[in-house]
Amino acid sequence: MRRGFTLLEVLLALTLMALVLSLIQGAYSGASRSRALSGAESREVHAATVALDRLANELASAFTSTASPFRARATRFVAASGFDGWSTLTFVTRLPSLPGSLPGGEAEVGYLVERDGDGVPRLRRRESRDLDGDPEEGGIPYEVLPHVSRFEVRCYDGTEWLEDWDTEGREEEPRLPLAVSVEVAWQAGGGEEEERILRTSTPLYRAQKATP
């Protein structure tokens, strides 16, 4: 005589199956979230590395000049410490030419941290080919790194590292810093716990040539 399953046995089997499926789904969801977070962090590290490499190259070619018959306005190098560890940096440099893009030449470049409409602090870069002598004007800022918790700039005068520097009205040598140190930190994946930090220190060759 063949005996079938009771209702209790069927319910127990279905419960066990649902439990196993929920465990499998939880493990898969966790792995997917970890993979997505790891990918986002890798992209952020890459973006920060590219931004600092570009900034270092631009700083290496930074220069200042006074007004002359060949140049209507004097150019400036300005680094200013700010609230929340957010410095601002503006300088004039010579950019290399890029195939299919703008030709190389002199440009005013600025880096600053601004909050977007959602309150997220973002490191932005702007570039202007109009050397108007005003470090806060010109160019259209665009984002290079989100969720920035710190952007600190320090300038070396041969003796100490300074948080603020402005070539306007600076009479002692060097007018340009001999080197610039930049540190950027951001919250990994947009979170509030893990912080990633990158640093770079770059000599300014024009300043070193002008210093005996």
Image (tube, rainbow, N blue to C red):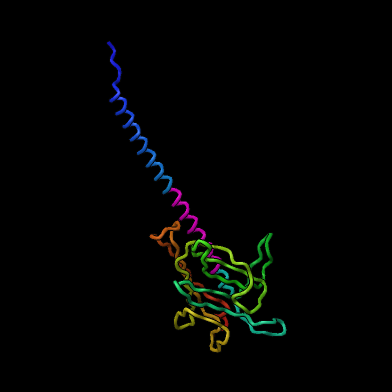
Q: Is residue 129 left or right of residue 113?
A: right
Please tell me in which quadrant of the rendered image residue 161 appears: bottom left
Q: Nearer the viewer, residue 99 or 40?
A: 40
| Residue 98 coordinates in the image, percent (x, y) | 66, 62
Furthest toward the bottom, the residue is 171
Furthest toward the right, the residue is 69
Kindly tell me whether residue 52 is visible in this rendering. Answer: no
Q: Is residue 9 left or right of residue 61?
A: left
Please tell me in which quadrant of the rendered image residue 17 appears: top left
Furthest toward the top, the residue is 1
| Vertical side of 112 occupied by 22: above or below | above
Residue placed at 45% from the left, 83% from the top?
A: 159
Kindly tell me whether residue 41 is visible in this rendering. Answer: yes
Q: Is residue 141 left or right of residue 101?
A: left
| Residue 55 coordinates in the image, percent (x, y) | 55, 68
Q: Nearer the viewer, residue 160 or 40?
A: 40
Quadrant in the picture for the C terminus: bottom right
Q: Nearer the viewer, residue 50 or 61?
A: 50
Residue 46 within the magenta-colored segment of the rendering: yes
Residue 62 within the magenta-colored segment of the rendering: no
Residue placed at 38% from the left, 60% from the top?
A: 193
| Residue 32 coordinates in the image, percent (x, y) | 43, 45
Overall secondary structure of the magenta section: helix
Q: Is residue 122 left or right of residue 69?
A: left
Quadrant in the picture for the N terminus: top left
Bounds of the magenta segment: 34-55
